[in-house]
Amino acid sequence: MSGLTVSGLEVSYGAAVRALHEVSLSVPDGSIVAVLGANGAGKSTLMRAVSGTLRFHGGLVESGEIRYGGRRLDGAAPHTAVAAGIVQSPEGRRVFGRMTVADNLRAGALTDRRHAARARHRVHKLFPVLAERSAQRASLLSGGEQQMLAMGRALMASPKLLLLDEPTLGLAPLLTARIAETITEINEQGVSVLLVEQNAALALRLSSHAYVLDVGRVALSGPSADLAAGDEIGRRYLGVTGDRAPLAARRQITRWSA
């Protein structure tokens, strides 16, 4: 299968903490795949393992495989993942606050100047506010603008697979909708997306397939439309039970479609 495949992934933090248990998933080329789960379910650990940053957080791949485009990446360094076309926009935005918007974007460019200029033009088309505020320090941007900058910086490396970790966390509904539109636009430009998102309704609307992690294991998986129509997502994430759960999920998804 082309794209990303994760097979039987086991990740630990030291001898006492097993964060992922036999996790398997796939992100076909050109798709958006969502990963849902509560805090501590293992979502960020999964993203770190795929991006090669796990070791910086004290984690270790104990077993299993991560392959992208036929290339094995479990245990690989971040620069190896980036060279393969995988770039992460981590949770918490993590922009360089003392640097300007322009310098933040420049930090994400790993290639020659002409390529960087094309990538910057693309980012500015997606996020015009970054062009308007290119000389402003990143710390002075709003939370939503910082999220746009974090995503823009990741796009400067021209990824084939973009890892988005909680891109709407803490954002107001209008900004959340704007970020959602941009994720769709990025995908339509040919970039695959692995989306970690606590907003289940939004994630299911954007993605074609979804996985639900629960205490480091894949508890549910399937086409996003099927998961949205079932009652399990409603029970886990929307606080409703019984016959009202699938209806509540559909109403939440419709809300983000408006």
Image (tube, grey):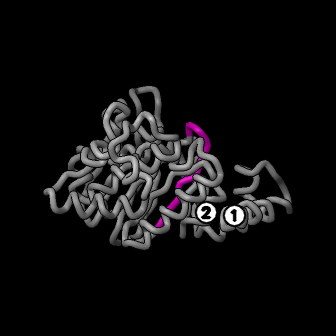
Identify the residue position indicated by label 1 in the image: 253
Residue at 33% across, 43% down: 135
Image disc number at residue 125: none
User: How far is mark 1 from mark 2, CA to CA?
Assistant: 8 Å
- Residue at the spot 48% in from the left edge and 62% down from the top edge: 183
Q: Which amino acid does label 2 sit on?
A: Leu
Magenta stretch bounds: 32-40
What label sits on residue 204 in the rendered view? Answer: 2
| Magenta stretch holds residue 39 | yes
Left or right relative to 82: residue 41: right
Left or right: 37 as drawn, with respect to 125: right
Q: Quadrant of the C terminus?
A: bottom right
Q: Is residue 100 visible?
A: yes
Q: In which quarter of the image is residue 68?
A: bottom left
User: Which one is in front, 28 or 89?
Assistant: 89
Q: Position of residue 7 (x, y in %)?
A: 39, 57
Provide the secondary structure element on which disc 1 rests.
helix
Q: Position of 187 compared to 117: left or right?
A: right
